[in-house]
Every structure is written in C-alpha cells, then in structure tokens.
Image (cartoon, coloured by chain):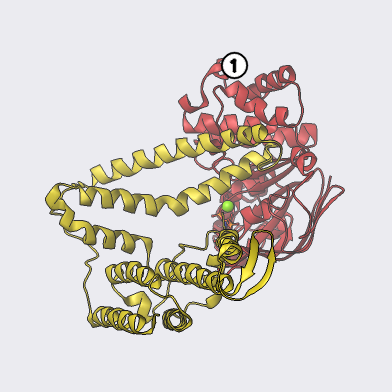
Amino acid sequence: MDITFDHVSFTYQAGTPFAGDGLKDISTTIKGGDYTAIIGHTGSGKSTLLQHLNALLKPTSGTVTIGDREITPETNNKNLKPLRQKVGMVFQFAENQLFEQTVERDIAFGPMNFGVPEKDAKALAAQMVKLVGLPDDILQQSPFDLSGGQMRRVAIAGVLAMQPEILVLDEPTAGLDPAGRLEMMTMFKKLHDEQGLTIVLVTHQMDDVADYADRVLVMEHGALVRQGTPREIFADPDWLRQKQLGLPKTTAFAERLQKLGFTFDQMPLTASELADDLMPQIGGGDRG
Amino acid sequence: MDKLILGRYIPGDSMVHRLDPRTKLMASFYYIAIIFLANNWQSYLLMFVATMVMIMLSKVKLSFFLRGVRPMIWLIMFTVALQIFFTKGGHTYWSWGWLAITQFGLTNGAFIFMRFVLIIFISTLLTLTTQPLSLADAVESLLKPLRVIHVPVTELALVLQIALRFVPTLMDQTTKIMNAQRARGVDFGTGNLFQQMKAVVPLLIPLFVDSFGIAEDLATAMDARGYQGGDNRTKYRVLQYHRSDATAAIVMVALTGLLVFLRA
Ligand SMILES: Nc1ncnc2c1ncn2[C@@H]1O[C@H](COP(=O)(O)OP(=O)(O)OP(=O)(O)O)[C@@H](O)[C@H]1O
Ligand SMILES: [Mg+2]
C-alpha cells in the first residue's frame, strides 16, 4: 500500500488569526514495503506530516492518497476507521495513551475497536507483549504500575496488535535505555524484513537512519527539502549541518579519518562498512 | 480545541495592553454595569461609540471580537426573539394569536441585542489584551482587603494562577491523547449517547493521570526551590498604577455622566 502526497499544504488553525504553517507544498511517495526515515530539526513539521498518513489531519490544500483512499480538504470524518486500522501509529510519548485496568485490556483495545472478537484480541495481546520484550505476567498488571519504558512498550504493543500494514513511528525510542532502544529498533526491523511491514520512522538518531532506513526525507520549516537514500543524504555533511542535522557516528568518524589521510570511495554508513574500507588501508587482510 | 477565541491573549503594545490589569478588570466590570443604564437610542449609541473607540485603541482587529460573539449567537437570537414577540405596545405591525410584532418589541429586541454584543466585546477586550497571569495578579491585589476576615487570598490566587497556567498545556495534551485514541479506532462525537460516553473514558483517564503527574512535579519543583506561601511574599511582577490608569478612571466617570444625561 503506497502513500502519495500531491502538493500537500497544511495550516494550523486555518482561517483564524492564529494560523501557522505546518506543511508547505509536499509532494512525495512512500512506497509499500519501504523503510522510510523522516529527519529534520525540532519544529520542522515531522509530526504534522505523520498525522496526514492516517487522516488525523487533512490537508488545507492538495491530496494525500493512502492506498485507494483519497484524502482532500473536503473529505469528511466518517468511514476513516478502515484506514486507521491499516496505518498503525505510535505517537511521541505513546505511553500517554494507556488507560485500561490491565495491560492485556489496553493492548486488546485497538483490535476490538476494529471488530476483532475479545478472545482473539486477548490472544493478540499475549503475542504482542512477547514481541515487545515484556514478560507474560505483566498482562494482568495495571499499566500505571509499570516503569516509563515498560509503558512505552505496552503502548507499542497496543498499536502492533491492530495488525497494521503500515507502521508509523514518531521517535518511538526517545527516553528508552540504550539496550531497550536497540531491542525495539531490531524488532521493528524484523517486522519490516519478515512480514513486509511498511515503516515510517521519525527520529533524531542518525545512526538509526543509517542502520535501518531505505529512504530518507529531510524536512525544514514545513517543507520537504531533500529525499533520497541514506547514502545520498549523508554524502553532504556540510549541508546537513546547515540544517542542524548530523552524521551517523560511523560516518563522522570516517570523515575525521579522511583528514588524517585515509581515503574512502563512498562514505561508510555502518561499522562493518567502515571496517571493510579500513582493513586494506592499515595493512590488514580481508576480514574473515 | 482551537476555537476558544474568547479569553485568548493577543500580545500587543497598545495603550489598552499597557493599562494596569487591576484598572482593566475594574473598568470592565464597571463598564458592563453602566451598559444597563442605557435605555434609549442616544445612550446606546454613546456606549457603542465608546466601545468602538476602546477597541480601536487596543489595535486588535475587529474580527477577533466578532468571533467572540459567534458561540453566543443562538442564545442572543433566542432572547431577542422573546423580546420581539412578547413585548406589547406602540404600533402593531403583525399579529397572530397571542404573538405580535410591535414597535416596542422591535426596539426592545434591538436594545437587548446591543447590550449582549457590547458586554461580549468588552469582556473579550479584557481577555485579549491582558495576560491570564496578570489577571490573576489583579484579582489577588484587589481581594487583599479580604485578608482581614481571614480569606486566604494569596493561596487562592496561587491556585488560580496555576490553573490558568496549565489550561493551554492540558488542551494540547487533550488533542494529543484524542489523536492517539482515534488512531486506535475510537470515534469521538459519533453514535448514541452511551457510545459517546464510552468513547470519553480513554480520553479522560490519561488526562487525569497526566494532570496528577503535572501537579506532583510542580509541587516537587516548588518545594525544591523553597517555595513558602503566606502574605509576606514579595512579587516578581509588581503592579503599579500609572497616569494612564487615572485617565481611564476619569473617562469612566465622564462616560457615566454623559450616559445619565442622555438616558430617558
Ligand atoms: N496544534 C498546533 N497548533 C499550532 N501550531 C502547531 C500545532 N502543532 C504544531 N504546530 C507548529 O507546527 C510546526 C511543526 O510542528 P511539528 O510538531 O510537526 O514539529 P516536529 O518536526 O514534529 O518537531 P519535534 O522534533 O520537536 O517533534 C511547529 O512550528 C509548531 O509550532
Ligand atoms: Mg514531533
């Protein structure tokens, strides 16, 4: 299922004296099956863009096409449920959405809203809890007795339980410990690789972009200023810094090595690429 | 959540913005009171012109004020209709059973309409040109005399200030949680009463949890910085009357005089 933006602009509080630009003339396609990363500094419009992916916001002008549904400024709010089921959305600080008495019921809440019978929804809850790396016995606990990181995982499980085709993640790992972050990111990658889930990830971690994404969208002041593969985007460090963005750690390290006389045909994005490039230059053989 | 125009401060640097909040608060109440003195065309015209001059002095666009009227329009129309149909006297233009449109009915309807609009304009002017926190300061300062009879004025003012401070925060939070639950398949505002009430639970519970969290954090932060209540606290924002405040008072008195002179 593709999502296409055609000259989409969005103004917050349109028609009032408080109107403010959210998005400016965005045209792009997010292909089904891709892992797309959206980067840009704070306030550049990333979260605003995400909310157009399941019609929580409707464009002020232009068209968003989600699968076979067209969302225009005139689209009314009825019959959006099938769309919302297909596009699962994990918000910034998703733990704020928990409300049920038990973890199990909170995770089952989404699927049940979309018509899954209670028994199946609970089975899904058990399955998802395992997927996000929480122990089984957490199912009967109150979500409010959990730690912040555990609550985040429950919220993510609640979205995964809807069995969406597209998973939209707004800084899903902000505030998790490093091990938890790696675990979550690996899990998303696995879902992408094994189940063909389309993933749209907003992140400030350039390492995650380099490690996981196939495609990158760069936002600034509500506009889409560049799109391409991670390699294309990270090939221009000066431009990135000018947009208040950085390089993945590996690429930054390679950039410094370059100044010491090392040469790279292509800037390495991951640690293993870097290692492959360095071995011949420091007189080692091929890596086993 | 974006439609609450009434009561939203618009930053500016006009004469009205710079008035002491106590002056504005008292003058607004006073002005609303004297609107009720108007009882003929001349006096209503005077109040209308005075209101328009004040709005012009505030340099806030008229459209903000018109928006303030919009949410009240049905109430206004209903009241005006009652006046028109049920006031008897003067020439009768139209009648049907006990319903009649008369000369007095029409004038009364027009007056009531003016009264509503003027009151809304003036309260909107107050809130558009005064920061909520300044208003809370003004309330505290004006209520100070009540301390004599052991009303905890400073504590009440603190409660008011904290409440005002967190209104926008909670409104943002409401929007965010509503979006998160919509994404999980909740339909707000559709279905029968029972379904609608059920839909509110996933919104209210996170909102409450969040508010308690905010309250706890705030209390800790205040303790950590050694906050102590009581009447002897000094203030960062000290309220002080200026010459313009005296001018405002004189204008109010003059307006009252003129009004008394003009009314029938
Ligand atoms: N509800 C709102 N009303 C008015 N303006 C808003 C609203 N939400 C966001 N904005 C504005 O829209 C712009 C884009 O905001 P957005 O939340 O999309 O940024 P972001 O890229 O997600 O930032 P961050 O990295 O901090 O999450 C900002 O300038 C913001 O002030
Ligand atoms: Mg954001």
Residue placed at 37% from the left, 77% from the top? B16
Could you tell me which residue is drawn at 56 percent across and 17 percent down? Answer: A140
In this view, the residue in front, A84 or A134, is A84
Q: Residue at x 36, y 81 (%)?
A: B259
Q: Nearer the viewer, residue B186 or A164?
A: B186
| Residue reaching furthest to the right | A68
Q: Which residue is mark 1?
A: A136
Q: Position of residue B4 (x, y in %)?
A: 53, 59
The x and y percentages for residue A272 are 65, 42
Q: Can you tell which chain is drawn yellow?
A: B
Q: Quadrant of the N terminus of chain A?
A: top right
The red-tinted chain is A
At label 1, the amino acid type is: Asp
Asked whether residue A54 appears in the rendered view, the answer is yes
Percent position of residue B155, x then y: 23, 48
A203 and B250: which one is in front?
B250
